[in-house]
Amino acid sequence: MEVSSTGAPAEPPGLAASANHTLKQNSSHFLNHGHHHHQGSFPSKSLVIIIISIFSVVVLLAIFLIILLLKRLKSAKKSNDLYKECNSINHESGSFIAQTAINFNSSPELRGGCLYGGPLGKTQPHRYKAVQIFTYKELEVATTGFSEANVIGRGGFGVVYRGVLNDGTEAAIKMLRRVGKQGERAFRVEVDLLSMLHSPYLVELLGYYADQHHRLLIFGYMPSGTLHHYLHNEHQPLDWGTRLMIALDCAMALETLHEHAIPPIIHRDFNCSNVLTDTNFRAKVSDFGLAKMGSDKINGQISTRVLGTTGYLAPEYASTGKLTTKSDVYSYGVVLLELLTGRVPVDTKRPLENMSLFHGLIAAIAAMCVQPEAHYRPLMTDVVQSLIPLAKNSSVASPGSSTFQSQRPSPSPTYLTTQMKTG
């Protein structure tokens, strides 16, 4: 008798084969099911990656927009602070205010905010005495009721009176004629510009008055009158040293406007009548009613109406209305020829008589300034640098004269509230 070694009954052959076949089918079904399930996971992962990518782009874009917004807010804050700083120059006390009734935004000719521009943290402007708003009664008392005896000048703009203010300061009080928009624009431009721009070579604005019927400007008094008066009226001729120093003062005034104001200022009506002198014949440039803001590009042009004084207008400006700082240079050249010859502009082409080499050098500078082509004219900075050595050695031309040496200030310019350009 045989005994099984496994201890288990033997299965029938048919049953074992059936079970084996069933196991293989189940294994095959499981593997196939797992394979299909693995294939279905690919679209889900791709979708997740796409969503993450889109979300990352949106986050980066949001961060970029936030940074851009913060920069714009910071820039706007700086601009606002700069504008407040410009206006605060004239707010040193409660009785002295400026830019209240008149401000840069209200002026059709001078827009863009503070003239000296640039970062205030680097170069702080010197704070001058603020421009005062006077009452009509104060000005009436100062001029003795606008007496004819106090009239020191007349013109198309109005009448100028000599007056004495309450504190004893002598002043030139200009009563403007209100003729159309141009008169109003001229008044606003003078107030806006001279309230913000100060130089020893520009006339000083002490204050103003404005109501529905009157427009008055109050300037520092220049007792010796205009350069036109000394050159073309019966008067003691100016010596060469004095003429040369007047030329230098005028050059420095225009240099201040062109090179040290941002953007540059074009006077547009520079002539002998707008050059005032004090008792020492120190010259200051006045009458900024036609001034225009120039282009900040080199030789950049602006288009405008042709206004100014006949004989002093640059040819390209007179013919096309295209205005640049070189238009002022041309007018300066005409004034320089007047200083040299003592003749009115229409006589500047006549031959010069009794000319020394010293005078010939001045004539050469004038000739460069009145070149018909604007790009051939020098910058006012170049004119200043050319005149300084002539002024220092002007005793060669007038050995008996020491007027300018003892009475004139140093020719080195000092710019008080315009920001200096460096480099």
Image (cartoon, helix red, strand yellow):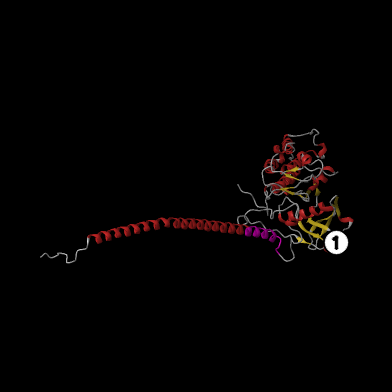
In this orientation, which residue lies closer to the viewer: 83 or 335? 83
- Residue 129, percent across and down? 72, 60
Left or right of 158 in this view: 126? left
In this orientation, which residue lies closer to the viewer: 98 or 278? 98
Residue 382 visible, this orientation:
yes
User: Mark 1 — residue?
Assistant: 140
Q: Which residues are magenta?
A: 76-92
- Residue 366, percent across and down? 74, 38
Left or right of 311 in this view: 41? left
In this orientation, which residue lies closer to the viewer: 64 or 423? 64
Left or right of 330 in this view: 53? left
- Residue 271, percent across and down? 79, 45
| Residue 387 located within the stretch drawn in magenta | no
Left or right of 236 in this view: 9? left
- Residue 251, percent across and down? 72, 45
Quadrant position of residue 312: top right
In percent of the image, x 65 and y 60: which residue is there?
A: 81
User: Which secondary structure, mark 1?
Assistant: helix
Q: What secondary structure is the stretch in magenta mostly built from?
A: helix
In percent of the image, x 22 and y 62: which residue is there?
A: 12
Q: Residues within 10 Å of mark 1 (few under 14, many from 20)?
A: some
Amino acid carrying label 1: it is Glu
Outermost residue, left direction?
1
Quadrant where the N terminus is found in the figure: bottom left
In this orientation, which residue lies closer to the viewer: 392 or 342? 342
Quadrant position of residue 127: bottom right
Residue 221 visible, this orientation:
no
In percent of the image, x 63 and y 49: which residue is there?
A: 421
| Residue 82 located within the stretch drawn in magenta | yes
Q: How many marks?
A: 1
